[in-house]
Amino acid sequence: MEIYNVIGLMSGTSLDGLDIAYCQFSYNGQWRFKILKTKHVVYEDKQKNELKEAVKLSAIDLLALHHSYGQWLGEQVKQFIDEEQLIVDFIASHGHTVHHQPQRGISCQIGCGQYLSNISGLPVVNDFRSGDLALGGQGAPLVPIGDRYLFGEYDFCLNLGGISNISFEDNGLRIAYDIGIANMLLNYLSQKIGKPYDKNGEIARHGTVNKVIFEQLNSLEYYKLTYPKSTGYEWFQAKIRPVIDSSDDSIENLLCTSVHHIAYSICQEVTSYSKNTDNQRLLVTGGGALNTFLIETMRDYMNKSVLIVIPERAIIDYKEALIFGFLGVLRKRHEINILRSVTGATDDSCGGVFYFPNKK
């Protein structure tokens, strides 16, 4: 049996912090995994704002942040390893996405692999997206290969981070794409009243749906596109915020409206691809899985043949970090870890660049 002990790192578009997952992957004709240790590092306000505003930086300032953030990642990983006394083969890091414009062949994740490698003292694999972009793909989403091999018992895998994304099998091909907005919008509204997020969706629960805003959000052009498609913070800034900011309705009502929009957009997609059989299962992970009002609203909109499954907390919180660890394992084995059926590239590929400590 082949065994790999890997640390996966993930910083999502929600900007809530860094997810660190120490995972063991084993292969004996079938892939299995264990999440052994985890840690969530909350961004301090200054760092959170730097990452949030990074999209506005000049090239030279963005490069400086790329290096300093890579150094910070290395410090966090080293501290985690020392605290837990871990034996690690290598680190697989997603980095933090600043720019994602696949139509221009651009996707920029900061967090320099060489700085991370030098400080942690371990090999690092990152920059998973560039190879797919060079093949004409979206460079996203990347998680579906993990959904196929690690969570194949589910009919659909949905992640509710800053953006909602989904993956599923269709006629032997893995299909995946970003559905649309999720926690990024809910957190934006919550922060207007001094809260980092709407815990359990309790504020939204006490609001009512603004039908005008609901319809405006539902009719955005992105939702009419067919896969492959992916989106991010720039789309939120350009298309979602203007709709929300145009309204003088209460935050309660706007949060309620946003929850209904998110649930509606997800359920439209799932329903369109669900089969005419009972007991189909939709695995929900990411921070949005903890928003009980959002999950209840999804169940109201959902095709009744689809069962929404909320897994154990470690899977909810660390599934993406886990899967980036798995992407790193596949990269080390020189095996396909990015699927053209998902990204729209001309070929399947093996993405990721390895860095090694270059100090004595």
Image (cartoon, helix red, strand yellow):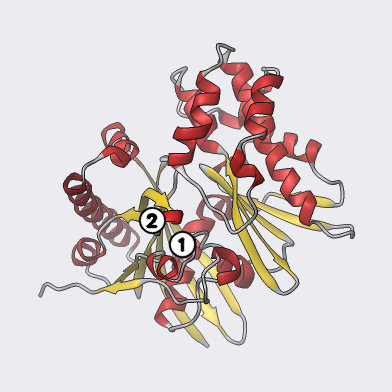
Label 2 to label 1: alpha-carbon separation: 7 Å
Q: Residue at x 26, y 71 (%)?
A: 122
Judge left or right: residue 254 versus residue 280: left
The foreground one among 38 and 349 is 349
User: Which residue is pictured at 53% across the width and 88% down the height?
Assistant: 1
Marks 2/1 in contact by CB < 8 Å: the verdict is: yes
Picture quadrant where residue 205 is located: top right
Q: Nearer the viewer, residue 15 or 140?
A: 140
Residue 70's x, y, as percent? 24, 55
Is disc 1 surrounded by few (<14), some (14 to 19) or many (20+) residues within 10 Å? many
Q: Secondary structure at mark 1?
A: loop
Q: Is residue 180 visible?
A: yes
Judged left or right of residue 185, residue 151 is right
Instruction: Point out the residue furthest to the left here.
Output: 360
- Residue under pointer 1: 139
Q: Which mark is residue 191?
A: none
Q: Amino acid at mark 1?
A: Gly
In x, y percent, where is residue 326?
Answer: 48, 70
- 319 shown above or below 332: above
| Residue shown at 28% from the left, 38% from the top | 56
Going by the numbered disc 2, the residue's amino acid type is: Ser
Q: Is residue 108 above or below residue 132?
A: above
Label 2 CA crowd tier, 10 Å (few <14, some 14–19, many 20+): many
**Residue 168: x, y in percent?**
69, 62
In the rendered image, residue 229, in percent from the top left (x then y), is placed at: 56, 54
The circle on residue 107 is: 2
